[in-house]
Image (cartoon, rainbow, N blue to C red):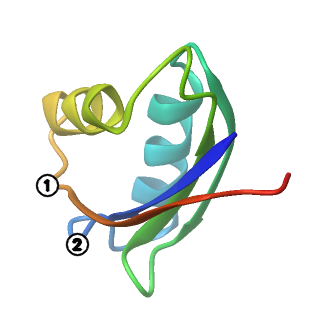
Amino acid sequence: MKECILKVPSMHDENSSREIINIIKGLIGIEDVDTNYEEGVANVFYDERKTSIDKIVEIVEYKGFKVGSGPDRSSAR
């Protein structure tokens, strides 16, 4: 499993945070998503055999959110 930190500056309240979580969790290969709207970040834990950072970013942007990605790092989870 990998972890990716996505910067989502357009996530600015609880509603947009929940929307981001629902969008990402709807993708195949997503294990977990944690968001912090005050910092504008989403930590995404995913199976790199089933999805990719590019696919995650593509769907979140398609749904109307601007996304930048932080460092991708392996997770021990």
Q: Choose top left, top right, bottom left or bottom right for residue 9.
A: bottom left
Q: Residues within 10 Å of mark 1 (few under 14, many from 20)?
A: some
Three-letter code, disc 1: Lys
Kindly give the residue lying farthest to the bottom in the view shown.
38
1 displayed left or right of 18: right
Q: Are marks 1 and 2 in contact (CB under 8 Å)?
A: yes
Q: Where in the figure is residue 63, as x and y percent of width and height?
A: 22, 31
Badge 2 element: loop
Asked whether 60 or 55 is in front, the reply is 55
1 or 2: tag closer to the N-terminus: 2
Q: Choose top left, top right, bottom left or bottom right for residue 52.
A: top left
Q: Where in the figure is residue 20, as x and y percent of width and height?
A: 44, 46
Per the image, the residue denoted by label 1 is 66
Per the image, the residue denoted by label 2 is 9
Q: What residue is at 20 percent from the left and 56 percent from the top?
A: 67
Residue 14 marker = none
Task: Please say if 34 is above or below 29.
Answer: below
